[in-house]
Image (cartoon, rainbow, N blue to C red):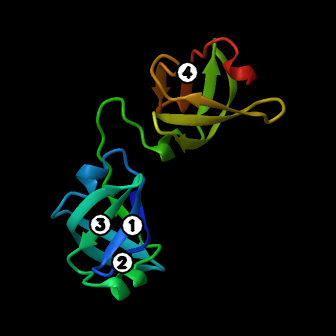
């Protein structure tokens, strides 16, 4: 199961909640009628999406099982999980973390985290020999190959990117 979002806080009095979606397909994952697995403090709950709409970079979602603000407040911090959906050339953040980074045939560092930027994801890479961190855009021109079997990411950065 992969994390697809979490409840930030209630919104209004009718049971709507603000959800920070951590999926690249929020419209599909939080579609009306979708049943989601919610986990909070070791407790699991199945919730059915009644409505969902974008709001200030997040989603406002109503669930069939949450009729009002008091119930919505009790769901603050709940995390939503779903089965992973794999397509060609798609990678989940957890799959990229820990991969070794190769440039011109030389191992130069390790992917330590993923930063989600408005345009695309960025690989946070800790370089060998000093631990300096750099951000590398996860775009085909700069990251032409991700080899999960060999735990490597091959990069072809433009001049100066690794010096920033």
Query: Seen in the image, is 74 located left or right of residue 132?
Result: left
**First in sequence: mark 2 vs mark 3:** 2
Residue 44 marker: 2
Report the residue at 54% width, 33% height from top: 151
Say which residue label 4 marks. 154
Residue displayed at 36% across by 77% down: 44
Mark 2, other Cα within 10 Å: few <14 / some 14–19 / many ≥20: few
Residue placed under numbered mark 1 in the picture: 18
Q: Are marks 4 and 1 in contact (CB under 8 Å)?
A: no
Q: Is residue 126 left or right of residue 18?
A: right
Badge 3 element: strand
In the picture, the disc for residue 61 is 3
CA gap, disc 3 and disc 4:
39 Å
Instruction: Please tell me which residue is depicted at 70% across the width and 22% down the height of the picture.
Output: 162
Q: Which is more N-terminal, label 2 or label 4?
A: 2
Q: To which quarter of the image does residue 64 belong?
A: bottom left
């Amino acid at each position: 199961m992969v994390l697809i979002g979490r409840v930030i806080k209630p919104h209004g009095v009718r049971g709507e909640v603000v959800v920070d979606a951590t999926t690249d397909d929020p419209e599909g994952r939080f579609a009306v009628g979708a049943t989601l697995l919610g986990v909070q403090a070791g407790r699991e709950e199945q919730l059915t999406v009644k409505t969902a709409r974008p709001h200030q970079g997040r989603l406002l979602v109503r669930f069939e099982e949450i009729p009002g603000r008091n119930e919505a407040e009790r769901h603050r911090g709940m995390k939503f999980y779903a089965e992973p959906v794999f397509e060609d050339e798609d990678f989940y953040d957890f799959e990229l973390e820990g991969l070794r980074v190769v440039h011109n045939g030389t191992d130069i560092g390790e992917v330590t985290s993923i930063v989600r930027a408005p345009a695309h994801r960025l690989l946070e890479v800790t370089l060998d020999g000093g631990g300096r961190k750099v951000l590398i855009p996860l775009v085909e021109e700069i990251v032409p190959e991700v080899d999960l079997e060999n735990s490597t990411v091959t990069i072809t950065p433009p001049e100066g990117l690794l010096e920033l």
